[in-house]
Image (spheres, rainbow, N blue to C red):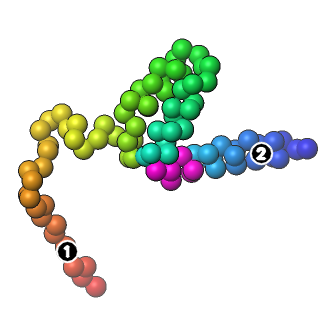
Amino acid sequence: MTVQWVAVSIIVPLCTLYAVWNLMGAGARRRVVSWLATLPWPAAWQQRLARRQAGASACGCDGCDNAADGRKAEPGAQSIVRVHRRMR
């Protein structure tokens, strides 16, 4: 077995897990994180899993409703979208 095969056998499964995690829904992510939190991990990893479990969102951000600087949109407010034509 060559070094290339060893590298491929490590990189491909890790990339697959990364892609599956990013494409997974928020509910499924919460279930996976809560299952992982039950396993015995080092203290730093347990803290990270607890933070993930508490604030799991679909996009990995703090959530639209947690905007700290008052960026909450008013109900019924419309945003302006400007479309520019390309000149050929």
For marks 1 and 2, give the CA distance.
Answer: 47 Å
By secondary structure, the bulk of the magenta-drawn segment is best described as helix
Q: Position of residue 32 (x, y in %)?
A: 54, 38
Magenta span: 19-25
Q: Position of residue 18 (x, y in %)?
A: 57, 46
Task: Name the N-terminal-most of marks 1 and 2.
Answer: 2
The amino acid beneath tag 1 is His
The residue sitting at 70% across, 48% down in the picture is: 12
The residue sitting at 22% across, 37% down in the picture is: 66
The amino acid beneath tag 2 is Ser
| Quarter of the N terminus within the rendering | top right
State yes or no: residue 20 in magenta. Answer: yes
State yes or no: residue 11 in magenta. Answer: no
Q: Residues within 10 Å of mark 1 (few under 14, many from 20)?
A: few
Q: Secondary structure at mark 1?
A: loop
Marking on residue 7: none
Dividing the picture into quadrants, the one containing residue 3 is: top right
The residue sitting at 56% across, 32% down in the picture is: 35
Q: Which residue carries the number 1 mark?
A: 84
